[in-house]
Image (spheres, rainbow, N blue to C red):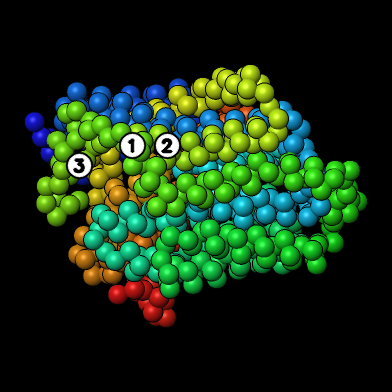
Amino acid sequence: MPWNQIYDPLGQWVLSTILAALPIFVLLGTLAFLRLKAHLAAVLGLAAALVIAVLVFGMPAGKGLTVAVYGAAYGLFPIGWIILNVIFLYNLANEKGHFKILQDSLTGITQDRRLQLLLIAFSFGAFFEGAAGFGTPVAVTAAILIGLGFRPLAASGLSLIANTAPVAYGALGTPIIALAGVTGLDVRSLSAMVGRQLPFFSIIVPFWLVWAFAGFGGMREVWPALLVAGVFFAVPQFLISNFHGPWLVDVLSAAVSIGALIAFLRLWHPKRIWGLEGREDGRAARGTHPHSRADIVRAWLPWLILSVIVFAWGIPQVKQFLDGISVFRVPVPGVDKLINRMPPVMSGPTPEGAVFIFNWLSFTGTGILLAALLSAAFMRFRLRETISVWWKTVKRVRYSLITVAAMLALGYTTRYAGLDATMGLAFARTGALYPFFGTMLGWLGVALTGSDTSSNVLFGSLQKITATQIGVSPVLMCAANSAGGVMGKMIDAQSIVVASTATKWYGHEGDILRYVFFHSLALAALVGLLVMLQAYVFPFTKLVVK
């Protein structure tokens, strides 16, 4: 029997909104202040969501439990599958000592920790975001940074801060494509609008990243390199998004940024070279090492294989082919098309689909597993050794997998019970200030779901309806949902768990959350201010796609 979502069950929208937000407060509060382990905090948040969904918002208990299981399954596949196999690849490289060689080879480009951070977390991370998304860039870059000697908190938090500006075009433009699908707006118009917002932040984020690591003085010493990395990402990001579309924005922009930064560092280095902990230890700008060129190639080979396969796995034609021979679609009983989104979130009652798609071969994590197995063969692992490393990896990440499953169960319960829409409608009551708060709604959506794509699906229609009511461009506000959402990526629990797992810093998810929360909120507010200017102030209004 269908169930219609209710968005103000108490007849007082303020009280209804507070109760809708309570599971999020439980999750983040127990993580950040009570310092519970992440899997316990996630389970408590899920329990709060189920109680409020059933007892306050009237969701049938059977549907609530089923939705939670559905979300947990999505947490394991594809998210947990990515985490497991990236760490597997990292452990393989570590076992053979290749990670140490990779670390030494990077010193041949620069020994300055600020510039290593810029190259790995921002430029390389943007490539992995563009090719795969879904936690891959944070898992890879955090693992590399910890291997380079960064402290776990810095490696985790800085990888999260860096993984922002590329997110809207992640996984070959998936968030923008999904946004066009749920709003009916032209995909190229949305791509162009986001491409007139995020390039400003593609220039800001490198400066912000190094400021968070090294302070203002340390950032000022390397500003030419920061400008090169940012500009050579931002300009292609603007051009490709506006004149081609969302599909190759990140991959090509990241490639340009990497090439430009490496070329620039061949010619320029700061006068003061930062070693570990920011100490000036008299080291040269570029280091030397005893490794042969063949050793360096072997050390980088697993990550080159990973890059090629992850990019190939993201190509729509490849994904379509793999889906054709491997996909299983399981409609969720009692939920699929049996829960209706209602006005004013939608223009009319709209059934919510709930189909678990187990496309095991086209999962990004499966591509990463293939890269790991090929790398194991190149590194001359025996089969027994490979299986042993994989099993050690499973044991290492088991609590992270539980956490991710519980986090996604919480997110899905929030979505299908209508709690997310109740919070969204509270933002929509802000009238002329809506361009700012609508952007913050995108931030909230990603913080809740862990995905810019999911946030766009959740709130895209609401953004379009509200924008039309207050008289601003629907394209602007739908794009703002995605652009604001990218700043929520660094505080979503899923990404924090990925970072803590990659850096082997289990149980410290609350520390990571506290480290990045200010940066996330401040950058999201800046995006909101830009959107306000685009909505009302000349010449920024000229940037708006009509």
Q: Position of residue 366 (x, y in %)?
A: 48, 36
Residue, disc 1 = 327
Q: CA distance from mark 3 to mark 1?
A: 21 Å
**For mark 3, does the 10 Å Cα neighbourhood hold few (<14), some (14 to 19), or many (20 or more) residues?**
some
The residue shown at (55%, 63%) is 253
Q: CA distance from mark 2 to mark 3?
A: 26 Å
Element marked by disc 1:
strand
Q: Is residue 365 left or right of residue 119?
A: left
Check disc 3 and give the amino acid type.
Answer: Glu
- In this rendering, which labeled residue sits more in front, label 2 or label 3? 2
Q: Secondary structure at mark 3?
A: loop
Q: Is residue 151 left or right of residue 311?
A: right
Q: What amino acid type should be assigned to the residue bearing mark 2?
A: Leu
* Residue 68 in picture, x, y percent from top left: 30, 28
Secondary structure state at the residue bearing disc 2: loop
**Label 1: few (<14), some or many (≥20) within 10 Å?**
some
How many marks can you see? 3
The quadrant the N terminus occupies is: top left
Q: Is residue 69 left or right of residue 393?
A: left
Q: Residue at x 68, y 43 (%)?
A: 301
Which of the labelled discs sits on residue 352, or is there none? 3
Residue beneath label 2, please?
A: 361
User: At x 24% / y 37%, what residue is drawn?
Assistant: 354
